[in-house]
Amino acid sequence: MGYQTLSFSPDTVFLVTGGAGFIGSNLCEAILKLGCKVRCLDDLSTGKQANVDLFADHPNYTFLRGDIKDFDTCMRACEGVDYVLNQAAWGSVPRSLEMPLFYCANNIQGTLNMLEAARRNGVKKFVYASSSSVYGDEPQLPKTEGREGNLLSPYALTKRCDEEWAKQYTRHYGLDTYGLRYFNVFGRRQDPDGAYAAVIPKFIKLLIRGERPTINGDGRQSRDFTYIENVIEANLKACLAPHEAAGEAFNIAYGGREYLIDIYYGLTKALGVEIEPQFGPDRPGDIKHSNADISKARRLLGYDPDWSFDRGIQAAIAWYRENL
């Protein structure tokens, strides 16, 4: 279980794109703890300099400031790299509705640039972030790979396109690619600020400050909230996955189902506050319910998540208490 016992040569070089972001910086940290070398590529458009500064003095860490929309930058970043963990993308369904052209350029062309650069540089494995949003309006639960519905946002479209491009690179160009459909990841270093901040860190920050959060919709929407440690495990195990599993996409979650209103009152209890939420309109492009079947990832990647929602939320609360 977990990833701490995985074995990589100390000469192994990982490239983490988006390595100054929430998920990327946690991947960089885990790789360094395994004794390997990590190269972080980020343009700091959504990533944070503070997440680079955490590792700046580590001898196995290198930061490259650059944009995946620039192919030459991608080529330089992939030189001498064994594994690419491609996390560089802009998230947020609502923001993608406002900026479709940018999302196409960044999330689709940027990922294609990375795939081609990885191929040309002889990278062993290309692991990339996809999203549960690719399931669209498919109502059946749990969400199962191969049973997708109509896409509900430009963001979801970019992730579906990334999966199809990756499949082509495995089929025609011999690059082993592994898509990870993240389900509502949360945990340390997730940004609680801004209009598009994820709900858990935003709730925690406001409640700690004694402010009243807004819940979009009625709070009865459900999600398979997934702690960051499970996502790290999936990325690293994908690097060791067999060629037979390449060209596929995998649900990465815990396999649970939490209702937003229950999470809210659980947080108020854990934080020792009595603040009633206010309710706002549903967010356009959002799905109502999401819950993952993770059996494919278990079978083909050896993914075996051991961080439940309850365990993860306690760790997240502790981190925000210390760092906000």
Image (cartoon, helix red, strand yellow):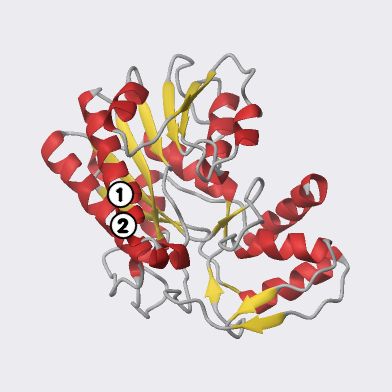
Image quarter in which the N terminus is found? top right
Q: Is residue 70 left or right of residue 230?
A: left
Label 2 Cα neighbours within 10 Å, binned few <14 / some 14-19 / many ≥20 = few
> In the picture, residue 274 is in which quadrant?
bottom right
Which label sits on residue 101?
Answer: 2
Please report the residue visible at 47 percent of the width from the left and 70 percent of the height from the top: 291
Q: Is residue 88 left or right of residue 269?
A: left
31 and 107: which one is in front? 107
Percent across and percent down for residue 177 are 28, 41
**Location of residue 53 by image quarter:** top right
Q: Is residue 22 above or below residue 97?
A: above
Whether residue 292 can be seen here: no
In-front residue for pair 102/124 = 102
Query: Residue 105 got which mark?
Result: 1
In this view of the protein, can residue 313 be seen by the observer?
Answer: yes
Q: Residue at x 31, y 33 (%)?
A: 125
* SS for dot 1: helix
Residue that appears at 34% across and 17% down: 80
- The amino acid type, in three-letter code, at marker 2 is Leu
Height in image: 253 above or below 8? below
Residue contact between numbered discs 1 and 2, judged by CB atoms under 8 Å: yes
At x 68% / y 76%, what residue is drawn?
214
Vertical placement of 86 versus 34: above or below? below
Q: Quadrant of residue 173?
A: top left
Q: Position of residue 236 (x, y in %)?
A: 45, 36
Q: Is residue 89 above or below residue 7?
A: below
Q: CA distance from mark 1 to mark 2?
A: 6 Å
